[in-house]
Amino acid sequence: MDDLLLAPALLAAKFDFGTVREYLFRDIVIKAAWRTLYISAYAQIVGVAIGVVVAVPRHLRMPVLSQLASFYVWFFRGTPLLLQILFWFTALPLYAPDDFGWWIFQFKHDWLLLSPFQAALVALAVNEGAYMAEIVRAGIESIESGQMDAAKSLGMRNLQAMRLVILPQAFRVIVPPTGNEFNAMLKNSSLASVIAFNELLFTSRGVYARNYQVLELLVVASFWYLVFTTVWTVIQDEIECRMRPEMRRAGLLTRLRNGLTPPSRLIGGDTGGGR
Amino acid sequence: MVSIQGVYKRFGRLEVLKGVTFDVGRGEVIVILGPSGSGKSTLLRLVGHLDRLDSGRIYVDGRLVGYVEGGGKLRESSDRVASRARADVGMVFQRFNLFPHLTALGNVTCAPVHVRSLSRRIAAERGKELLRMAGLGEKLDAYPSQLSGGQQQRVAIARALAMDPKVMLFDEATSALDPELVGEVLEVMKQLARGGMTMLVVTHEMGFAREVADRVMFMDDGVMVESNTPAEFFDHPQHDRTKSFLSKIL
């Protein structure tokens, strides 16, 4: 934008903690942080769904569908996310067909004109879907071929075997990298600021464009990004822990307690019982 | 019950089956012996329609496996038709292949519920009965990882039986087991044979072959070399290849 015009004002700038404190919990910042969280979670969930839908036909080598899926992954992993965001918001509406109607469906020429939120959501989700497709595929491929044999010998159809046998097992392999994807998504959502979606970064820039407190506002934004990624890391650890069979019953509290107990007591006391 | 007619199968350049032909009557127990790489397992996988055959035909209960016959030509059957055919053939694998994310009972009821559309209650009742027959009445809620190899294989047998198959195929069902666990699995298989199940058994257990089989067959290098009653087979083998195989293992 016009950040460069701010340069002269910065020459004698001093870092002002007051400004940080003032904006950290301001209504507009909290709302913007919420939008960042909201669009990231939304796009991630849609992305996971796309990933599964794209990975399965690729794995089963379904004709036509698997080629389409490969093309999709190739294209959206091969072009920059920023470019894709600009495409959905700016380029797509230019090529929308004129008004047309068919039976009960009526299309207006502006039906492809997406709001910044819609465009950002579509861009993030569709991009994420391409990455998730690769992650889901790796998960599916990690399952022994004997599982598919067993499922088929019981009369399951391809998609049934996927749903009932392969995907539930692949889930364990898929979850850790998906957690990392969401971590990246929280930060990539800031790219939506270029199409004026008022998430955290866009809002911070809007504020410092007015008060010239650039570093302070970037610190405010960083604070919220760090809160989100840190909390997510804890949640991710918890999920991964619960997936390990030996930890299945031990929740966060149990493990915190075990963590605080000296090891000597754990060895003798917790499991011994009879002594 | 099973009719195998001139079956050929190759993997790339390797010819694994070179024209295998035989019939299995209803309630008959056939044991197939042979050195590793002779094509025994491949033959079972073809009967269970897990792989496609290159030429020849396999019928199970009068129905062509894996192909649809029309106008003198064979067409590969669709996923839907093929899966229905597979449901009638029970298979037990060397590596058990239990579903690790389901309990013993879950393993047994999964296919009846989702493939045969049985209600969960009825499937569970039948599943419990089958597991009890396999001596696992106490282990209904155990996960495969909590079971011994022998127990896992017995769950796998119960799982296959839950689909009421017309034929049961055993692909070296005891080869991955510790020696002391082999007996319990063979016992369930014997019980099944006595109950009149049609069975095709690939195994290295000569005792089982002698005691349970109606016919013993010897396969080598993709062809069926010899087929006879157990007594004749073991005491008066006809072919040199059979003799040399038996001399190595007996």
Image: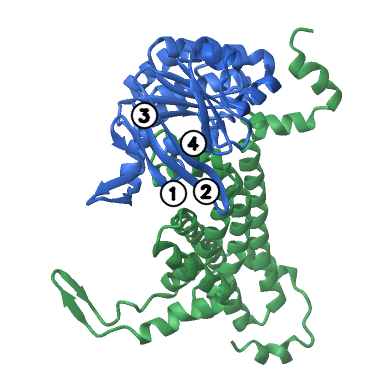
Chain colours: A green, B blue
Indicate the position of residue B14 as horizontal and vertical percent values: 58, 49
Q: Amino acid at mark 3?
A: Val
For mark 3, name the chain: B
- Dots 3, 4 in contact, CB < 8 A: no
Query: Cα distance, mark 3 to mark 4?
Result: 12 Å
Q: Nearer the viewer, residue B68 or A29?
A: B68
Identify the residue under disc 1. B54
The quarter of the picture where the N terminus of chain B appears is top left
Is residue B226 left or right of B180 when viewed as pictured?
left
Query: Cα distance, mark 4 to mark 2?
Result: 11 Å
Label number found at residue B10: 2
Q: Quadrant of residue B161?
A: top left
Label number found at residue B43: 4
- Dots 2, 1 in contact, CB < 8 A: yes
Earlier sequence position, callout 4 versus callout 2? 2
Indicate the position of residue A270 as horizontal and vertical percent values: 75, 19
- Dots 4, 2 in contact, CB < 8 A: no
Query: Cα distance, mark 2 to mark 1?
Result: 7 Å
Q: Amino acid at mark 2?
A: Arg
Please tell me how crowded label 3 is: few (under 14), some (14-19), or many (20+) other residues with Cα within 10 Å. Answer: many
Q: Amino acid at mark 1?
A: Asp
Earlier sequence position, callout 3 versus callout 1? 3
Earlier sequence position, callout 3 versus callout 2? 3
Identify the residue under disc 3. B2
Label number found at residue B139: none
Please tell me how crowded label 4 is: few (under 14), some (14-19), or many (20+) other residues with Cα within 10 Å. Answer: many
